[in-house]
Image (tube, rainbow, N blue to C red):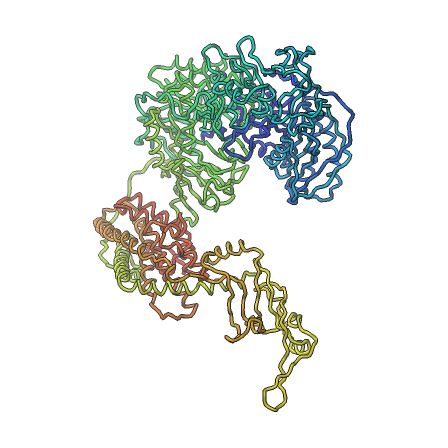
Amino acid sequence: MRILHLVVLWGSLALSMTTASAFHGTNLPLNPCPADCYGSPENWHVYSSFDRLQICEQPLLLDFAIHTPLEDPNTTVKLRMCTLNDGLSQSNDFPFDGTEQFDPDSISYPVDGSLVSFDLFTSNEKGTATTNDLRNTIDLLQRQLTDSVYRNTDFLIAYSKGAVVAVYSGAAIDKTKTLPSVLHLFQEHLNTTASTKLPMNMRLQLCEEDRNGDHIIGVAINIAGNIPTVQETVQTWNKAACVNNTEEYSTKLKGIRIFEASAPKPIDSTNGNSGHLLARAQRANSCRTTTVAFGDSCGSLAKKCSISSADLSNLRPGQMICCSKGSLPDITPKPHPDGSCATYTIKPDDDCSRIAASNGLKIDQLEKFNDKTTWGWSGCKTPLVIGTNICLSKGTSPLPAPVSNAVCGPLVPGTKKPSAGQKLESLNPCPLNSCCNIWGQCGTTPDYCTPATGPTGNPGTAPRGKNGCISNCGVSIKNNAKPPSSFINVAYYESWNWDRPCLNYRAEDMRDTKYTHAHWAFASIDNNFQVTVNDTYKQLDDFLQLPQKRVLSFGGWGFSTSPTTYDKLRQAMYPEHVDKFVDSIVKYLNQKGFDGVDIDWEYPGAPDIRGIPAGLKSDGPNYLTFLKKLRSKLPASKSLSMAAPASYWYLKSFPIAAMSKLVDYIVYMTYDLHDQWDYDNHWTQDGCISGNCLRGHVNLTETMYALAMITKSGVDANKVVVGLPSYGRSFGMTNRAACEKSLNDPHCTFKGPNSTATPGECTGTAGYIANAEIEEIINMDFDDTRVDYDPVSDTTMVFYGSNWVAYMPAESKANRTAIYKAANLGGVVDWAVDLQEYTDDSLEPYDDELPDTDPLPPCNDVYNSMEELDAAAGNIPEHCVTLYTLTALNNLLKQSLSNYTDMLSNGYDDKFKVYSKSVADQAGSTLRDWITTNGTNYYTCEVAEAAICCDSCKRNQRRPSECDYCFDDDCFHYVHSGDFGPPTPVLRTKVYKESEPCPPDYSKRGYGPDDPYEQSVYWTFFNETGFFTDMESDTGIPKNKTKMGDYNRGNPCAPSSKPDDPCWASGIDYNVPLINGYSASDVANPKEIVRKGLENAQTLGPQIDSIIATLKLDGWIGEGSDLIDSLSMPIFMIASATEKMGLVETIADKIEEAKRKAFILEFLSAIFLFIPIVGEIIGSVAELADVVVIMGLIGAAGNAGMDIYTIVDDPHNAPLAIFDLILSPLALADVAKINKAANIRRGMKGDDVAKLGDGVKSRMETVEKVKGKCVSR
């Protein structure tokens, strides 16, 4: 078995692809975490997305440009990260090649610490990270900040398990003394917090009106992993503004000691200070200077300069100003003597304005010095990228600042300037000539290989959201101008296939196949480096008699990776053994008569194959030497080939370009691109950090990338023979419904780490299943099997039970072969020929003699209907079942189509009028029922309670709450009738508005009968949005078909009643939705879709006539059961639709609700059964756009009509697939199509057949009975 443990590089993780040039190389390229924190951020690893935070479980330090919007997906983001450990960052002795400058603002003049109060703002929302995670993050950051490495770092972020802690301090703050102190006090505050659920956002700041940007201190915390939120706060402080969120809770934290540096000493240009650039521009009468900070006012600048206030308007942060008499010195940087420009490295809080101002430049000068030339510069109209070396003067551009984890291009540490005529982009190319992107990372996908530059066209830039290729770009197949002399077709033969309980295959079965080359898998090597071949099942002699080129293959996955044999090929290629091994191969090939030899070492130099030691650097060179020697000693008539992995990580250990010159062809293993080993592997799948997303193991997209990789490496395309598997990689799904919806659904994953897929009956290995076994699953009558196809990746996939498998059927292999042939590739190779189909092969001798048989009697009976067929089921000869059944089916089809056509012309329109009016009439009742059933979830209610005296109420109390509102006054008042008789006592009532639960909760209702509920209710929304959303979802009634109003459910008021009469306290619901404008004219007419279905179905009868004639002549070459199973269900659906429409009567305008619902469902059912004939699903048919509404109106859930709806509205429904096949032109003459349609029918669940209605189900049972299967009724 050929298993390729593939690691594919994907996405925007910006991964290293080698460790040779990475500083502190103990961090392997595929380590989920960056290197340990070492020195300042310039020395950390660089990434272009936050994906690392999802896969690294260690605490991290982060650094990025403050003003680059992280939430903008179109922004180029450069992230510098390192892994925090328990120790401090090491000293900054990293061999950094950037140009260092003396910064006068960094001169510190210590003063005594002072105690201040900080403002703490906390949000109402709660976060997800735990208190311990936050404390640990703060503790690690606190200890890091005591290191002098960070003395000039204004901004730093620590991250761990969703806890984000950012510190910010202006230039005037002594950071190593102050920031640990601030964090310590905040830790103490956390210890006093009783809540275990912390606020999501916390902001601690020292930011007062008299503080400019140099004196602000802040700590921003988010414990939901939201770094952009923290960035926004830091941006505020960096602009000398304060956080002031009135919606957040605020408090004071007092007694925090801070240490400030006094304002930087004004610089006297005549004092001989040569440390600053201005020392190069001394001139007489220069003034003393200081630098403007964000937030500076005229007063603060006057105080800083110790001069009286003056007009200091229109100043920019970073700008130098005079603090004494004299003129400003010339501080503009000057080019170096060698012609190179003055260089500056961009800091996290930089923007063009600040850089220009602090160097005596204008922004347009800055752009002129850098546009089109400087590496990584995208101009001043986009956020600046930290760590970029830029020019501050005229002159040649500097080398880019090195990136510690860059592995290609000019960012690799230690890179020297290019020679004359050499471009920066060409420095340090990737292995295999793979693509290098602007971050110095190698890859093989469009994310790495698409060349593009940023808005200024500078090298080392890319458009927003892209990673821009700088060298060896493109994902197209190269070196393919010349086709092969002949396009070969190779098949591997698994000599051990007889170890399986089934799916056995004789070697001689390959004789009459399409293959040009047959590879025997596998030969081995003994301890003396001699060839050995296991022929336990005596197939080798037959193999050597094949007409194809017969090739002996060595190695394979098992031999190359087994702990007992993994070193055999390596040792055989050692210099001291290689000649003996080569001689043994040549001798054996000549002795046995093989036509060639194939070497399959999986894989030389591999560092990470489980269970065996890492490969050696000498593996690749030794392998090359071996091939040279073998080629020189092989007779010219014998071929030499080798297998190569389709993985960058393994292929880069092969000197593949040189090897390709020695071999006749390369077996390129473009299968097993994905398998169970992807689980928890962060690098294998684009957009799937967890690694356990379902992906096809031989998808076309990744295969084409792999072909581009090997041909770009220097291999001629006509020597590449591309892999085609005859097996599938199967997985146990975690959520089948999500996967059927889309493989890209976030809930569509597979179980792990070990495969939970059901093993095949023959292969017996979870996760690996033969094509023959897959197609048997499809062909068997499994209720839950579904076949799907993705045209983009050319992947055929099968869902069965909780299993998912991708595989390559014959038509896909043919399509791939055509693609590869058109690309001038060398051929295709199939693993393996014995996995393709079941045979009757055994190791016993063949016996071709069969007994004579009597001729079958003729099929002369005629059965015109399914009922006649049912009555004769037990007496029909087996060989007549197909003919008799098709005759009955054909008669039923023709009669049904005739009847439905007549109804469409005579009577349909009257039926539709009643249907549409019934639908409209039902809407009000449905809406009312829904409100009274669900109202309490969306409304608060006041109920008009008509109370009586407590004496009367309690004498006849029926419920505990009935007398809650009674009163103790007189029970009666007396009314005179107008004559001279005694007055009449009338029960006294009082009406109260009481807050009570809304219906259907009647637990607090007062006086009145149980049924109906008489009290008027005043409804008030508390969740209006949710109400209308759920109303439409549950009933199908949209909000725009309702209006707010009062619903009268039996109010006793007379027309003359006044607004304040007590009668209004009964029988009214105030302020509820009412149906508005939903009439019969709103109901769509599906007549046209029925007409189209009838037209499509008319083509079926003549085809069946032709098939019946063929059957009578015994000319049908397919399975008779395929004809029955492919045609019976479609015909029964047409017949059932006809019968249902015939039963629909035109009835009186006024009908009771139950009959109205039955009428609607009967009408819809007759339509639904026609939808698959049109080749549509309900949701895509304009004439049925309102059917969801209608089904909701009548509460159809659980009804037979709803059952039909759920089947035919599924885009993957079986009836649609069957109709699509049998209604295609000349379909019934196509045995393959009929077989496919029959298999789809057999794969339907019994429950799904039943959902199509009794008219279909009962007839299907008749068919099964006639076919001789037991049917339970």
Front residue (pair 826, 855): 826
Front residue (pair 723, 102): 102
Spot the residue most to the bottom.
Answer: 980
Q: What's the residue at 34%, 35% (across, down)?
A: 845
Spot the residue most to the top.
Answer: 337
Q: What's the residue at 32%, 47% (across, down)?
A: 1220
Residue 600 in picture, x, y percent from top left? 44, 23
Q: What's the residue at 49%, 30% (across, down)?
A: 464
Residue 688 in picture, x, y percent from top left? 51, 35
Figure check: 204 above or below 925: above
Front residue (pair 923, 354): 354
Residue 200 in picture, x, y percent from top left? 64, 41
Q: Quadrant of residue 449?
A: top left
For residue 374, say whether it is visible. Answer: no
Residue 75 in picture, x, y percent from top left? 52, 31
Figure check: 872 above or below 719: below
- Residue 630 located left or right of residue 1072: left
Front residue (pair 78, 1076): 1076
Q: Quadrant of residue 242?
A: top right
For residue 954, say whether it is visible. Answer: yes
- Residue 706 located left or right of residue 77: left
